[in-house]
């Protein structure tokens, strides 16, 4: 452990969870997925927001460091929002991401976490954090520049959860 700050690229390189996936194995297509009772209810409810989506990633001029809550962004979970429109610490359910095939082969359950902000995010816009490197955006490319349907799924404390506990 060092006493000073650790450069982001060093921290990411040391992250054992990060996996680079060859582009040919990533699909941006949604697939049919079984929904639990909460997801079914959220899919049927009226949207709380409709927002134009952009994608962002770490490295190469993308995001660096922690999000606006001081947390490490979680790929395919962290969302940057305009806090005057969507409050930070809101657990979001984004319908269009349900069933999206992710780089590790799992399927997205639709849950995201409003834990970041950005200078270019004004009004009904959101940025979806896709992970490290431009290639991480491939799996969500079909969502870029689209208006997404977002439902408020509650609040969260602390930092956004990792994949293993996100939909709990």
Image (cartoon, helix red, strand yellow):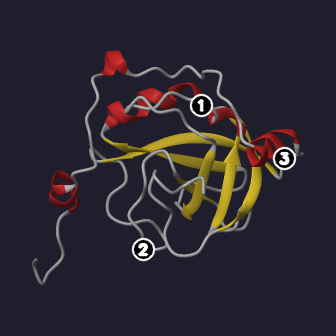
Q: Which residue lies furthest to the top in this view?
A: 24
- Taking the spot 60% from the left edge, 23% from the top edge, the residue there is 30
**What residue occupies the far left of the structure in this picture?**
2
Q: Along the polypeptide, which appears first: circle 2 or circle 3? A: 3
Q: In which quarter of the image is residue 37?
A: top right
Q: What x and y, as percent, mark residue 149?
A: 76, 40
Question: How many labels sit on residues?
Answer: 3
* Rendered position, 156 above or below 44: below
Q: Specify the quadrant that holds the N terminus.
A: bottom left
According to the picture, the residue beneath numbered tag 1 turns out to be 143
Mark 2: few/some/many CA within 10 Å (<14, 14-19, 20+): few
Gap between marks 3 and 1 measured at Cα: 17 Å
Provide the residue designation for mark 3: 47
Q: Position of residue 34 (x, y in %)?
A: 68, 30
Q: Is disc 3 in contact with disc 1, using a CB cutoff of under 8 Å?
A: no
Classify the position of the C terminus by image quarter.
Answer: bottom right
Pointer 3 or 1: first along the chain? 3
Relative to 34, 144 lies left or right = left
Q: How crowded is mark 1: few (under 14 residues within 10 Å), some or many (20 or more)?
A: some
Query: Residue 59 placed where, x, y %?
Result: 28, 47
């Amino acid at each position: 452990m060092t006493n000073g700050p650790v450069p982001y690229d060093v921290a990411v390189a040391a992250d054992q969870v990060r996996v680079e996936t060859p582009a040919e194995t990533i699909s941006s297509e949604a697939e049919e997925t079984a929904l639990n009772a909460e997801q079914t209810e959220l899919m049927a409810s009226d949207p709380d927001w409709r927002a134009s989506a952009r994608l962002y990633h770490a490295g190469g001029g993308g995001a660096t460091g922690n999000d606006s809550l001081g947390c490490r962004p979680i790929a395919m979970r962290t969302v940057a929002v305009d806090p005057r429109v969507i409050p930070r610490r809101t657990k979001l359910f984004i319908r269009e991401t349900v069933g999206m095939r992710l780089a590790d082969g799992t399927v997205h359950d639709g849950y995201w976490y409003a834990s970041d902000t950005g200078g270019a995010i004004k009004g009904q816009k959101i940025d979806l954090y896709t992970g490290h490197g431009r290639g991480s955006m491939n799996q969500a490319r079909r969502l870029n520049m689209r208006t997404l349907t977002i439902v408020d799924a509650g609040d969260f404390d602390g930092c956004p959860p990792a994949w293993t506990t996100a939909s709990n």
